Image: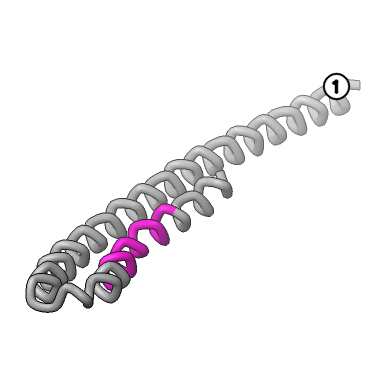
């Protein structure tokens, strides 16, 4: 009878250790995915800001000389802003994995 109780206690302890290990891995996975989402948004917004700043200033110079080029200039600025939107979409996909 003592062997059965000892075996049941050992199995319960192993199950408890496995649950703690699974809980710790899910915490680290959540932290990792959160940091990855933050880095993806941060870097994409930084890149989009640099792109829009440079493209926007060049577009304003082009529009000052040739006003008919406004649609083309806006298209280039929108392409630069698309970087931020793609980073945000990537972050949302990462956060869905949590």
Q: Which residue is at the far right?
A: 1
Q: Is residue 55 left or right of residue 37?
A: left
Q: Position of residue 35 (x, y in %)?
A: 37, 47
On whether residue 79 falls in the magenta region, the answer is yes
Q: Position of residue 78 (x, y in %)?
A: 32, 65
Count of numbered tags: 1
Residue shown at the point (8%, 77%) measured from the top left: 65
Residue range corresponding to the magenta coloring:
76-88
Q: Which residue is mark 1?
A: 2
| Camera-nearest residue between 89 and 69 | 69
In the image, residue 17 sits, relative to residue 56, either above or below, namely above
Residue shown at the point (82%, 27%) measured from the top left: 8
Q: Position of residue 1 (x, y in %)?
A: 91, 21
Secondary structure mostly seen in the magenta stretch: helix
Q: Is residue 4 left or right of residue 9?
A: right
| Camera-nearest residue between 46 and 59 | 59
Q: Looking at the image, what colour scheme do you see?
A: one colour
């Amino acid at each position: 009878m003592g062997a059965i109780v000892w075996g049941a206690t050992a199995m319960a302890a192993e199950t408890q250790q496995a649950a703690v290990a699974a809980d710790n891995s899910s915490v680290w996975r959540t932290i990792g995915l959160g940091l990855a989402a933050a880095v993806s948004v941060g870097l994409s917004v930084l890149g989009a800001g640099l792109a829009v700043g440079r493209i926007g200033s060049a577009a304003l110079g082009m529009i000052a000389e040739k006003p008919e080029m406004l649609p083309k200039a806006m298209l280039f600025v929108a392409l630069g802003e698309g970087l931020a939107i793609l980073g945000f979409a990537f972050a949302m996909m990462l956060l869905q994995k949590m």
